[in-house]
Image (tube, rainbow, N blue to C red):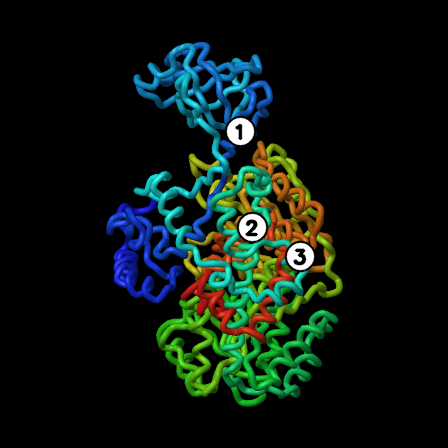
Amino acid sequence: MVPTRPPPAVARRASATSRASVKALASGDAARAPLTALGGVGEKVAEKLAARGLLTLQDLWFYLPRQYEDRTRVAPIRGLVPGLAAQIEGRVEAVERGFRYRPMLRVALGDDSGATIVLRFFHFRSQQVAQFAPGTRVRAYGTPRPGQYGLEIVHPSYRVLSDHDDAGLSDRLDPIYPAIEGVGPAVLRKLIDQALQRLPDEAALELLPAATMANETLCQGLPSLREALLTLHRPPQHSDLTALQAGKHPAQRRLAMEELLAHHLSLRRQRIAVQSQAAPALTGARLAKRLEAALPFALTAAQRRVFAEIRGDLAKPVPMLRLVQGDVGSGKTVVAALAALAAIEQGKQAALMAPTELLAEQHLNNVRAWLEPLGVRVAWLAGKVTGRARRDALAEVADGSAQFVVGTHALMQEGVIFKDLALAIVDEQHRFGVHQRLALRDKGQAGGGVPHQLVMTATPIPRTLAMAAYADLDVSAIDELPPGRTPVQTVVLSAERRPELIERIRAACAEGRQTYWVCTLIDESDEVVAQAAQTTFEQLSVALPELRVGFVHGRMKPAQKQTTMRAFKDAEIDLLVATTVIEVGVDVPNASLMVVENAERLGLAQLHQLRGRVGRGSAASNCVLLYQPPLSQMARQRLATMRETNDGFVIAEKDLELRGPGELLGTRQTGLAAFRIAELVRDAALLPTVQRLGEALLRETPEAAERITERWIGGAARYASA
């Protein structure tokens, strides 16, 4: 709920905006003019508008309707379609006031088509009942639906008309704006109308060069920005309502394109800013060759290709900005280790940061096994490293004797000072906040430059999202799994078949294999139909007394968690009951069966990560997705996708389609998913055009690029490249 009074910072912004009123108007800059310049906007209304981020006239220009109502015509009742909103007009045939569970008013309305519809009200006053005398002429708007006596409209908006009332129809669609607490819809519409009267002419408002737009096929036929805004706020009578409701009207596409362009430009400008700084050129290859020769496995062609791309970046005296994405088990860590050796060989430092101690410790173990035989000193910094061990680690990092530092967010704390950090590696980067990622990058400035940045993710990124959210990064994909991996077979089962599954676990463990059983909750919940992990652990311990059953969850102390996970990895536990804490960072090649309880509650990316915990050895592996019926339509689609494919990139595209970008990669941390108009899935076709327009603007009219970014993003742009 929006607070009655905005936070102090918002109130200060509103006040500062008010003081800027005369200055902005005097300079002729209507876009920056404060809302107090409008009639009816005093201090209190300004505060309520500011609480929704509405401070200037431009903010109101871009505060677009969430939907539209077509009151330009009256539809015959006989022609109404359930689910399609319409305006009707008729006379009251009957009125019934009753009480069935709660007060209810039903009004039967008939028209010249010979059909009748019921208007149903649950909240009403006695005066309203008196309005609906039989024979009264009523015009109503709402969405019809099947009811007990035919079609009905629940709580329509309506008007009682006199027999002499001409009651002309509207000549345009009615915009419905997102509600603002304390500002009624009628007041908001009046304010927006006032703001639109101050909309500059086309030449002053348009920032996209006509010549640049003319070269793009998708831009041809789109209206100017001014025309698009006026169309969306005041849609003409014959506007395509279906296209407007779907967000596909040319006016909406014009605004979506400019908004996507603004985000793209902010990222590209951040990249240019970062790469204008110096970074050490890392050309050493001797240690990397020694490591590759010592590895007990051969690199895949995809790993070699991606490492070659990284090596080319590191050799340049500008900061590398590269994202490496690869499915679970594709071998990103060894590629990162090879990259780190280029820095270490030249007497500099590298750091690898992971979001959890579990994942960071797995990286630590791998990196130590690979690099310490080469004489590389690997240091460990995490929350559980305390006392003398922490002091020693900090000293080694500061004097440079720690050449490769592995840790969690503890790496970014103020007390951590690197002597010469040349490469910052961030794993599962979307799990970190903006300021955390910036803090690690800033650690390299002690060496007199900006470190190269390598970002890794095991969540395959759809091309659409990569183009929009990572325009500041070069993207590499390790799209090949190591040889010997067998695809995991996925089965979807109703929870009613648990007894069969328990017998399957008994058989698998009898053959020397290990099993995961993942639950979505730790304790029982009355509100959520889910089998809690604690209960499952107890039940499975009783049902399978011959097996060694372990239990791990997020509330355990890190030391307990690590002990249990290590016991499972060392085959001292046959069946591990766990919460989704094991989603990333666990590598147990002997585990060949994964059971996910209440799989319908998890997103595709999380299900795919969990499934990736098995199939890491040569034995045939299976993933069983247990669900609690009935399934929602979205859950049904998710489970079907998991059953049909093991391809993380296909799964990522489907996840983007189902959930949108905000949840998928945590991009809300940077504001990239908080689009006002654009939707990445719906507007994906615009992205190639946006990229070309962006490059052309930065090259030919950088001042226009800056103004477009400021119009749509403002001060948030500086965080976009983090």
Image: 107 above or below 562: above
Residue 508 position within the rendered picture, expressed as x and y whole percent measured from the top left: 68, 47
Regarding residue 663, the answer to whether it shows in the image is no
Is label 3 in a helix, a strand or a loop? helix
Q: CA distance from mark 3 to mark 1?
A: 48 Å
**Looking at numbered disc 3 in the image, what kind of residue is underneath it?**
Phe
**Looking at numbered disc 1 in the image, what kind of residue is underneath it?**
Arg
Q: Residues within 10 Å of mark 1 (few under 14, many from 20)?
A: some
- The part of the image, by quadrant, that contains residue 337 is bottom right
Regarding residue 366, the answer to whether it shows in the image is yes
Dot label at residue 73: 1
Q: CA distance from mark 2 to mark 1?
A: 23 Å
Q: Residues within 10 Å of mark 3 (few under 14, many from 20)?
A: some
Residue 541 position within the rendered picture, expressed as x and y whole percent measured from the top left: 53, 43
The residue singled out by tag 2 in the image is 251
Label located before the other in sequence (3 or 1): 1
Image depth: mark 2 or mark 1 in front: 1
Label located before the other in sequence (3 or 2): 2
Is label 2 in a helix, a strand or a loop? helix
Dot label at residue 515: none
Is 96 in front, or is 130?
Answer: 130
Dot label at residue 649: 3
Residue occupying image coordinates x 45% and y 74%: 440
Q: CA distance from mark 3 to mark 2?
A: 32 Å
In this view, which residue lies farthest toward the left? 43
